[in-house]
């Protein structure tokens, strides 16, 4: 049951069945059994009538757009398909272009839009007939944090102003808090559902008395479901004791990669200390993969220099290559080989002797928790386990430096936790790990982070440092909890232009927490609205990232 | 409502997409013409100037006259006088000659005695059609030479020998030029395989990008989508048709004796068949590569091999005739050649038209049946 005017989230890893549910509800996929009603219509019997009243945005960054058409033509096409009267079409189009800030790009072909803009245009197209009910399939996966915030603003506005019902799927657990209710999906079954706050309250409380995150909720639900005990959150090895005194594991100076007119990586410089877990955090298309490919020597850079363990890029020999491990973003295993055969193949590629392999393979199997699965085909393994095998192959030859390109993308939280456990074990052994991710919440597992946006490095530092710098610039957040958050948002917005809705809570950046808290209390009291509590909370990694993107943008503007 | 807005939206969008992809548009317009020109110039079925060599062991005036007669005909070109039988063998193997002629030492003497003289011809039989033609030409030239000998003998002796002389005249194509046969035939083959190729990716491309979900989830009716996809490709096919017609008329000077309106109407119907066939493939398959392959195989082979384009259908075996009868290009091929060269009208071809119409309805019906707004 999803209620009118509600934002309902379906959460789960890849392959959990999120898309299938959405496709069944939109009448695109025929259910094998069961019943479903959408807007009062029985969609199992005949899904056609309901299609006029819903909007559906399929998975993938604006993949349903027509590249050859301009922004406006795309919207018009959807308007024509749904026979929106010209007058209403013009009005809706104007409003949607305004709130998505796509107005200046009306005449631009969709092919020339960035990932975030495409996603917003896809949203405009889905909303052009202002449907009562919209289905969004992973609308924010891999989208940059700025566009993500825009996206949520638009959703909240629709809910507040038009009473639209939103059903969306996501694999970001931190997004769940923005939904009114969520259902956690695993292997096609709902393993928990309810309001995020209630779910958190049900979960065990940790030693410090804070209610646990939704990740913990999901992991505990998974434990009940699979009977498999979860490891504790990985301990982050302390960065203390590692210094630049030694030769940097990786040193990058002004590294650039251009593909024709497009600059994928733009003058990036940073250093990685030996034995460090160094994270590249950024949305899809930011240049993470290109950067990693240049550092592994797969892709020649267009400019700049880089040194791996003191050897300049492009000059290092076979010996250095043997010290590198690389796990690519795409599935790099041979599906028709077994776990053991895959490992043996990689051992052969790196010319390991039979004796070495004999002693090393059991170690790897133990480390990646693949014991007992040696004879299973790689293609048949669940995604999370397959990724562990890929990691095992990448570290088989005992590299001193490992590049992991989005190893946890689409993996369920339990498997993700296990994966990070292995990474921290590796780092404890002195292996340097460079890992890329688009999950903001994974930043906490890295000792140092590079925030990457549109090919540029917008900030480098430990997660705490970065958050501290952002808080110094932006202030902290006040979180307002109230029963009637829609009304409250309207009221608060008049005084605090930067306020934004975070699910059913209102977030307000503040430099003077006490004074602002009192102002908010007064405002709501005047409007006669109830107020549960106002809390001061730290900036999230997403807020931090947005702060750095915006301040990098300002520098750019001042330079011109 | 004066027009169907959803259908129009689908068609317009498709047209915009085609027009804005410059490479695609160039290909869609230029490839049919290139195929036409390459085939019309390159594919001459006429066998002329067959290179041959002679081993003349007689070296008499009569043997030279015989060789000269062959060499002067437009069918044969004398390449070498050889001294050695082994050389004929070599040149045939190398392919520098297609025929070797051996005249025995007693050629003139035997003839003078009123006996039969024998001449041996070795023909390269690796391409049977051409070998067959070479042999016919040789026999014809030989017969003419015999007639001459007979005339001389008649004059010398005063005796009378009766014979029959055949006077042939080729109707519809008086000079027996193969281009008059090939170019209208190319119209039938091109207008079949090319629209199939173009339309075969029309729907499947949307399935690959994911934009098909826009259609699945909208209130559009199935026929509106199928018709909206069909029309732009039909239009593109008609442009191809007009270009082929103009080129055939102005560049190749193909005589056109029939009704242009009838030809155009038939072409439209025929294009409907081929476009619907491509669309059906596109609806049934999931990837562009598969659709292109199936489209290619299922259109090029019928269009070239079973349409009567190269091989006359009544000379085919039973299975070939059956294939030809069930494939649509055969019916248009018959019509297009008849209209071009014989100027035949609808009274002869109403059954062909009816058959093409049935194909169109059947293929469109199947497309509608198999296009589901579901995965």
Image: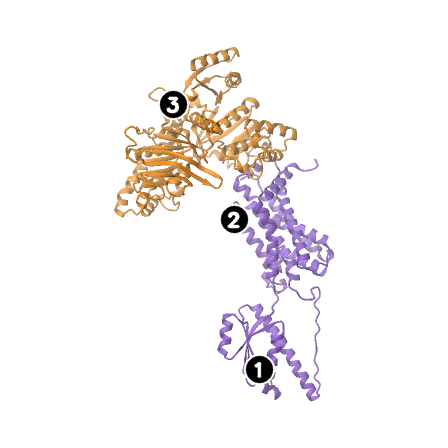
Front residue of A501 and B95 = B95
* Element marked by disc 2: helix
Q: Residue at x 56, y 84 (%)?
A: B58
- Residue A216 coordinates in the image, percent (x, y): 38, 26
Q: Distance between the residues labelled 1 and 3?
A: 110 Å
Which residue is denoted by mark 3 in the rendering? A468
- Colour assigned to chain B in the rendering is purple
- Colour assigned to chain A in the rendering is orange
Q: Quadrant of residue A220?
A: top left
Of the 4 image quadrants, the one containing the N terminus of chain B is top right
**Within-10-Å neighbours for mark 2: few <14, some 14–19, many 20+:** some
Closer to the camera: disc 1 or disc 3? 3
* Element marked by disc 3: helix
- Residue A461 coordinates in the image, percent (x, y): 37, 28
Q: Going by the image, does B52 lie left or right of B332?
A: left
Q: Is residue A114 above or below residue A332?
A: above
Which residue is denoted by mark 1 in the rendering? B118
Q: Going by the image, does A436 lie left or right of B186?
A: left
Label 2 chain ID? B
Q: Going by the image, does A459 lie left or right of B297?
A: left
Q: How far apart are marks 2 and 3 (CA)?
A: 55 Å
Q: Are marks 2 and 3 in contact (CB under 8 Å)?
A: no
- Residue B306 coordinates in the image, percent (x, y): 60, 59
Label 3 chain ID? A
Q: Are marks 1 and 3 on the same chain?
A: no
Q: Distance between the residues labelled 1 and 2?
A: 60 Å
- Residue A85 coordinates in the image, percent (x, y): 65, 30
Q: Quadrant of residue A26?
A: top right
Front residue of A239 and A410 = A239
Q: Is residue B178 above or below residue B82?
A: above
């Amino acid at each position: 049951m999803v209620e009118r005017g509600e934002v309902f989230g379906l959460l789960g890893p890849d392959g959990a069945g999120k898309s299938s549910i959405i496709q069944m509800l939109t009448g695109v996929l025929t259910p094998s059994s069961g019943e479903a009603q959408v807007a009062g219509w029985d969609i199992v019997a005949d899904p056609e009538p309901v299609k006029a009243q819903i909007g559906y945005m399929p998975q993938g960054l604006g993949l349903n757009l027509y590249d050859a058409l301009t922004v406006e033509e795309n919207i018009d096409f959807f308007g024509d398909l749904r026979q929106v009267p010209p007058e209403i079409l013009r009005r809706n189009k104007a409003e949607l272009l305004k709130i998505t800030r796509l107005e200046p790009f009306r005449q631009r072909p969709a092919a020339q839009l960035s990932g975030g803009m495409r996603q917003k245009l896809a949203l405009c197209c889905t909303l052009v007939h202002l449907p009562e009910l919209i289905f969004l399939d992973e609308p924010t996966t891999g989208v940059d944090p700025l566009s993500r915030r825009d996206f949520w603003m638009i959703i909240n506005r629709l809910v507040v102003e038009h009473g639209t019902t939103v059903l969306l799927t996501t694999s970001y657990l931190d997004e769940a808090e923005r939904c009114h209710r969520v259902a956690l999906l695993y292997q096609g079954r709902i393993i928990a559902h309810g309001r995020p706050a209630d779910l958190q309250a049900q979960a065990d409380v940790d030693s410090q008395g804070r209610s646990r995150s939704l990740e913990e909720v999901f992991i505990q639900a998974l434990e009940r479901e699979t009977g498999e005990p979860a490891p504790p959150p990985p301990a982050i090895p302390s960065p203390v004791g590692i210094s630049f005194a030694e030769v940097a594991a990786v040193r990058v100076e002004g590294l650039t990669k251009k593909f024709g007119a497009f600059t994928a990586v733009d003058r990036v410089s940073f250093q990685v200390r030996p034995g460090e877990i160094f994270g590249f955090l950024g949305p899809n298309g930011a240049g993470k993969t290109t950067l990693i490919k240049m550092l592994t020597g797969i892709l020649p850079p267009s400019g700049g220099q880089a040194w791996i363990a003191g050897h300049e890029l492009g000059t290092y020999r076979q010996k250095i290559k043997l010290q590198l491990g690389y796990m690519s973003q795409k599935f790099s295993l041979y599906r028709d080989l077994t776990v053991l055969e895959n490992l043996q193949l990689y051992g052969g590629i790196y010319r390991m002797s039979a004796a070495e392999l004999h002693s090393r393979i059991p170690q790897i199997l133990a480390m990646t928790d693949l014991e007992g699965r040696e004879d299973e085909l790689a293609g048949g393994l669940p995604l999370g386990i397959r990724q562990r095998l890929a990691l095992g192959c990448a570290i088989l030859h005992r590299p001193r430096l490992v590049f992991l390109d989005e190893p946890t993308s689409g993996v369920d939280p339990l498997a993700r936790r296990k994966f990070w456990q292995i990474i921290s074990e590796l780092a404890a052994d002195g292996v340097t790990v460079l890992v890329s991710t688009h999950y903001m919440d994974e930043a906490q597992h890295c000792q140092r982070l590079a925030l990457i946006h549109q090919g540029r490095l917008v900030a480098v530092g430990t997660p705490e440092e970065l958050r501290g710098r952002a808080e110094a610039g932006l202030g902290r957040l006040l979180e307002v909890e109230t029963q009637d958050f829609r009304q409250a948002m309207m009221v608060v917005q008049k005084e605090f232009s930067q306020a934004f809705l975070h699910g059913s809570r209102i977030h307000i950046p503040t430099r003077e927490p006490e004074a602002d808290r009192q102002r908010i209390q007064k405002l709501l009291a005047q409007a006669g609205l109830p107020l549960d509590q106002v809390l001061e909370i730290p900036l999230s990694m997403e807020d931090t990232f947005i702060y750095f993107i915006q301040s990098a943008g300002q520098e750019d503007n001042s330079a011109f | 409502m004066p027009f169907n807005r959803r259908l129009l939206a689908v068609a317009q969008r498709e047209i915009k997409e085609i027009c804005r992809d410059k490479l695609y548009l160039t290909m869609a317009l230029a490839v049919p013409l290139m195929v036409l020109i390459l085939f019309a110039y390159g594919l001459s079925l006429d066998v002329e100037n067959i290179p041959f060599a002679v081993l003349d062991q007689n070296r008499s005036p009569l043997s030279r006259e015989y060789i000269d007669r062959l060499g002067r005909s437009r069918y044969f070109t004398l390449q070498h006088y050889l001294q050695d039988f082994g050389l004929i063998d070599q040149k045939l193997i190398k392919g520098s000659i297609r025929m070797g002629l051996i005249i025995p030492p007693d050629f003139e003497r035997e003839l003078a005695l009123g006996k039969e003289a024998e001449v041996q011809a070795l023909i390269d039989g690796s391409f049977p059609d051409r070998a067959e033609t070479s042999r016919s030409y040789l026999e014809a030239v030989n017969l003419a030479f015999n007639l001459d000998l007979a005339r001389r003998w008649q004059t010398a002796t005063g005796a009378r020998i009766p014979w029959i002389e055949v006077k042939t005249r080729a109707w519809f194509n008086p000079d027996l030029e193969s281009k008059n046969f090939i170019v209208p035939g190319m119209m039938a083959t091109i207008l079949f395989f090319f629209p199939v190729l173009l339309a075969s990716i029309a729907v499947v491309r949307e399935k690959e990008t994911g934009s098909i979900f826009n259609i699945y989830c909208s209130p559009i009716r199935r026929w509106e989508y199928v018709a909206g996809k069909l029309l732009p490709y039909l239009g593109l096919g008609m442009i191809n048709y007009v270009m082929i017609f103009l080129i055939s008329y102005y560049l190749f000077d193909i005589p056109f004796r029939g009704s242009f309106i009838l030809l155009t109407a038939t072409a439209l119907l025929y294009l409907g068949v081929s476009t619907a066939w491509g669309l059906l493939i596109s609806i049934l398959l999931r990837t562009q590569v598969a659709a292109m392959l199936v489209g290619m195989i299922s259109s090029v082979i019928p269009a070239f091999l079973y349409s009567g384009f190269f091989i006359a259908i009544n000379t085919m075996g039973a299975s070939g005739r059956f294939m030809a009868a069930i494939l649509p290009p055969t019916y248009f091929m018959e019509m297009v050649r008849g209209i071009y060269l014989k100027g035949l009208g609808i009274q002869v071809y109403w059954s062909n038209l009816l058959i093409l119409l049935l194909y169109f309805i059947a293929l469109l019906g199947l497309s509608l049946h198999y296009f589901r707004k579901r995965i």
